[in-house]
């Protein structure tokens, strides 16, 4: 049995590596598609033309783990008076009138083993486009590319941020 131990260990390691590679590939395979949203939200209009800051809608980015998807009340700050007759804005108004939230679909999701918060990135004055791409040119929010460990480590190294595993992983 002792002479088979290295072979068993090598096989076990190979299986674990294969599972991780397949899992990462599966998780990143959707990273180029824009998920369908209940309301067509033109980021280009709001960010580029109207020059709204990301934090105007994503109000919890500097406070909580998730940047947060905007509640319908935030949309209604403007759309209670702007956009009558536009079918997409009418969806927003209907949601507000019925007191039902808009069920936005998340565009980004990190694996459960990652402890990520926007707050230190905002404190470091990183622009949202560093990770999310040029949202000001997007009519539909979509991943700008893969957001994986390689991208994070590269950015951390460029900026002298911590690269110790326990800093980002549970």
Image (cartoon, rainbow, N blue to C red):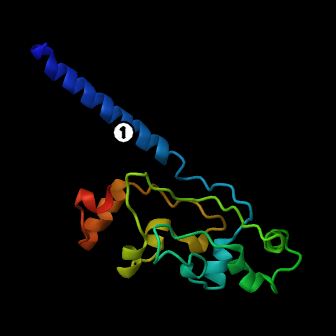
- Kindly give the residue lying farthest to the front in the view shown: 99
Residue 82, placed above or below residue 132: below
Indicate the position of residue 20 as horizontal and vertical percent values.
Answer: 36, 39
Q: Residue at x 61, y 84 (%)?
A: 52
- Kindly give the residue lying farthest to the top in the view shown: 1
The residue at which mark 1 appears reads as 20
Q: Residue at x 35, y 55 (%)?
A: 149
Q: Quadrant of residue 72?
A: bottom right
Q: Quadrant of residue 107?
A: bottom right
Indicate the position of residue 27 as horizontal and vertical percent values.
Answer: 48, 45
Residue 84, placed above or below residue 150: below
Indicate the position of residue 82 as horizontal and vertical percent values.
Answer: 80, 84
Indicate the position of residue 24 as horizontal and vertical percent values.
Answer: 41, 43
Q: In front here: 85 or 120? A: 120
Image position of 70 (left or right of 129)? right
- Kindly give the residue lying farthest to the left in the view shown: 2
Query: Which SS class for mark 1?
Result: helix
Marker count (numbered): 1
* Quadrant the N terminus occupies: top left
- Alpha-carbon neighbours of circle 1 within 10 Å: few (<14), some, or many (≥20)? few
Q: Residue at x 64, y 74 (%)?
A: 44
- Kindly give the residue lying farthest to the right in the view shown: 85
Q: Residue at x 67, y 73 (%)?
A: 71
* Quadrant the C terminus occupies: bottom left
Image position of 40 (left or right of 84)? left
> Is residue 125 at all visible to an observer of this figure?
no
Residue 29, placed above or below residue 140: above
> Is residue 4 at all visible to an observer of this figure?
yes
């Amino acid at each position: 049995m002792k002479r088979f131990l290295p072979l068993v260990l090598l096989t076990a390691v190979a299986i674990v590596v294969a599972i991780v590679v397949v899992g990462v590939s599966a998780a990143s395979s959707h990273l180029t598609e824009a998920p369908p949203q209940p309301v067509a939200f033109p980021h280009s209009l709001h960010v580029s033309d109207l020059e709204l800051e990301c934090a105007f809608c994503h109000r919890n980015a500097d406070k909580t783990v998730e940047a947060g998807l905007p509640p319908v009340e935030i949309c209604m700050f403007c759309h209670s008076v702007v956009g009558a007759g536009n079918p997409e804005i009418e969806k927003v108004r209907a949601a507000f009138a019925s007191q039902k939230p808009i069920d936005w679909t998340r565009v980004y999701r990190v694996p459960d083993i990652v402890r990520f918060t926007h707050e230190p990135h905002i404190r470091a004055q990183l622009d949202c486009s560093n990770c999310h791409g040029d949202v000001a040119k997007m009519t539909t929010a979509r991943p700008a590319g893969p957001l994986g460990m390689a991208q994070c480590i590269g950015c951390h190294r460029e900026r002298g941020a911590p690269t110790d595993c326990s800093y980002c992983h549970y």
